[in-house]
Amino acid sequence: MKLRVLILGYGEMGHAMEYLLAARHDVRIWNMGVVVKGSKATLEEEVAEAQVILFCLPVNPHHEIASRIAPYLAEGSLCLSIAKGLDESGRTAAQVFDSVFNGKHRYGVVYGPMISEEIRMGRYAFADAVLSDAADFGVVHNLFRSSTLICQQASDMHGRSWSVILKNVYAIMFGVADELKLGDNMRGHLMVAAIAELSGIVQAFGGQAHTPYSYAGLGDLLTTATSEGSHHHALGRRLVRGEWSDISGEGVHTLRMVEKYHLFDWRSYPLFSLARDIATAPETLNERVEDYLKLLRETESCAI
């Protein structure tokens, strides 16, 4: 069935979603206050006729935009976000939707290894779709049917949100290890340690232990942590090289929000703590990496 889809944001992922959907659906686009593609003059008018509203925006503007469009959403419409970060209040996209819509409108998140450049090259991408109402998966299935985005229904929205957000933090450490030439064995350790910590953090939030073993967790972590085109992998390399003038990105912002709002006991997670310390004080990088490895050596007898 052909759907009326409104894409909010026309950056790399907005273009990628247009590539996936335009041939099979009636796609409209809004960006930076302007209706880029559509028959209506305003965002509100486009929203009123859309069946799916796809947020291809960072998390920060989600609250403002969701609040603006909420009164105009058509009955039965579905808001979806692909944003993998925290806003300035330390909230995930799902938490923003929940607070704004307050049970009056349905929403979901679509998370997984979805590199925009690869999507636009016709390569496959993969995602978990977690919805406020599981019955809406039929809409998501119809939305991406016959496209190169393979989307599976999933649960534990909070756990998957945190998995996909925190993977950016851990991806930094893969870049650090690669630039330090610590080898492929170290990559293996980092992957195991990152997933173990993700599982612990997700459970601390009341999520399911297995959630990080998913497209939103392991799948996206592997992609982000090993891709030479990854911003966070490149950031880790730059930190080692002493290029500290622009320490930024979703992972860095996440580190700041976790510490600012005490979102969880981050010092209980050694690899997360290492990423936080070297992003905050990169001049201590070599010392902190050696401390981390020393900690591993001291605790190796406790492994099962």
Image (cartoon, rainbow, N blue to C red):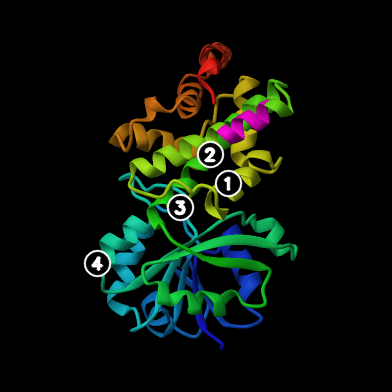
- Kindly state the secondary structure of the residue where label 1 is placed: helix
Q: Distance between the residues labelled 2 and 1?
A: 7 Å
Going from N to C along the chain, the mark reached first, 4 or 2, is 4
- Residue 69, percent across and down? 33, 72
- Residue 142, percent across and down? 56, 80
Residue beneath the point at 44% across and 46% down: 209
201 vs 64: above or below? above
Confirm or deny contact between disc 2 and disc 1 (CB under 8 A).
yes
Going from N to C along the chain, the mark reached first, 1 or 4, is 4
- Residue 226, percent across and down? 68, 40
Circle 1 is placed at which residue position?
218
Circle 2 is placed at which residue position?
195
Residue beneath the point at 53% across and 39% down: 195
Q: Which amino acid does label 1 sit on?
A: Leu
The stretch in magenta equals 186-192
- Kindly state the secondary structure of the residue where label 3 is placed: helix
Q: Does the rendering let one see residue 249?
A: no
Residue at the limit of the structure toward the bottom, as seen here = 1
Q: Distance between the residues labelled 3 and 1?
A: 10 Å
Disc 3 residue crowd, few under 14, some 14–19, many 20+, Cα 10 Å: many
Going from N to C along the chain, the mark reached first, 2 or 3, is 3
Circle 3 is placed at which residue position?
160
Instruction: Using the image as rendered, state which of residue 142 and residue 282 is in the foreground.
Output: 142
- Kindly state the secondary structure of the residue where label 4 is placed: loop
Q: Which amino acid does label 3 sit on?
A: Arg
Q: Distance between the residues labelled 2 and 3?
A: 12 Å
Q: Which circle, 3 or 4, is nearer the viewer?
A: 3
Circle 4 is placed at which residue position?
102
Q: Which mark is residue 191?
A: none
